[in-house]
Amino acid sequence: MAVKAKKAEKKSLLKAAEGAAIAKAVKEMAEATSTITPGEYDVDVTVRVKGKVKKGHDHPTTVTPKLLTLDNLLLALSKVNDETRRTILREMVEAYKLTVQTNTSNTPDAAKRVKALEARVKKIKREAEVGLEKAKISVSATATGATTVKLDTVEVVK
């Protein structure tokens, strides 16, 4: 019975590896969709995929949370008074508008203001990282081993 279970497990793993290879081939082929002109097309193809799939071992890791997430920003905003919250939100809206303006009209003044804004954001991120390091906030976890797919052959058989 144990031999049968091992064969079934190996067959299941093989199907998963084949699925990973097919997914990679499909992704590579999907990148070509930008060259298709508008219209409707009838297709009937068979794809042959050949290569190697490698799955790494799960391993212990230390996860440090990202401080500057939307949830953490909202939590921080909930801790400040109304006037400070309004000021922060107003600055965020202005920063967004400035970024959109710069992306749509490349004026030197707007570009300079965006650079200043980016420098402020980098400074805040550095301060946050230092604060996290001092607080020693981290969690032990198990990272899933990486799966790599190297395809030697992807051909469409007609």
Image (tube, helix red, strand yellow):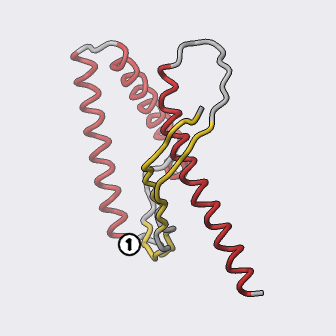
In the foreground, 71 or 38? 38
In the foreground, 49 or 17? 49
- Rendered-image quadrant of the C terminus: top right
Please tell me whether mark 1 sits on a helix, a strand or a loop: loop
Give the residue at the far right of this rendering: 1
The residue under the point 48% across, 75% down is 140
Give the residue at the far front of this rendering: 158
In the foreground, 102 or 14? 14
Give the residue at the far bottom of this rendering: 2
- The residue pinned by badge 1 equals 136
Type of amino acid at the residue the image marks with label 1: Lys
Q: Is residue 39 above or below residue 140?
A: above
Residue 46, position in %: x, y? Answer: 62, 38
Residue 129, position in %: x, y? Answer: 33, 59
Asked whether, in this view, residue 70 is left or right of residue 64, the answer is right
Asked whether, in this view, residue 43 is left or right of residue 78, the answer is right
In the foreground, 29 or 147? 29
Asked whether, in this view, residue 2 is left or right of residue 140, the answer is right
Mark 1: few/some/many CA within 10 Å (<14, 14-19, 20+): few
Q: Is residue 48 above or below residue 17?
A: above
- Rendered-image quadrant of the N terminus: bottom right
The residue under the point 49% across, 42% down is 154
The residue under the point 42% across, 22% down is 97
Residue 64, position in %: x, y? Answer: 42, 65
The residue under the point 51% across, 35% down is 29
Q: Is residue 132 above or below residue 111?
A: below
Residue 86, position in %: x, y? Answer: 50, 34
Q: Is residue 25 above or below residue 65?
A: above
Counting every numbered tag in the picture gives: 1
Q: Please tell me in which quadrant of the rendered image residue 92 appears.
A: top left
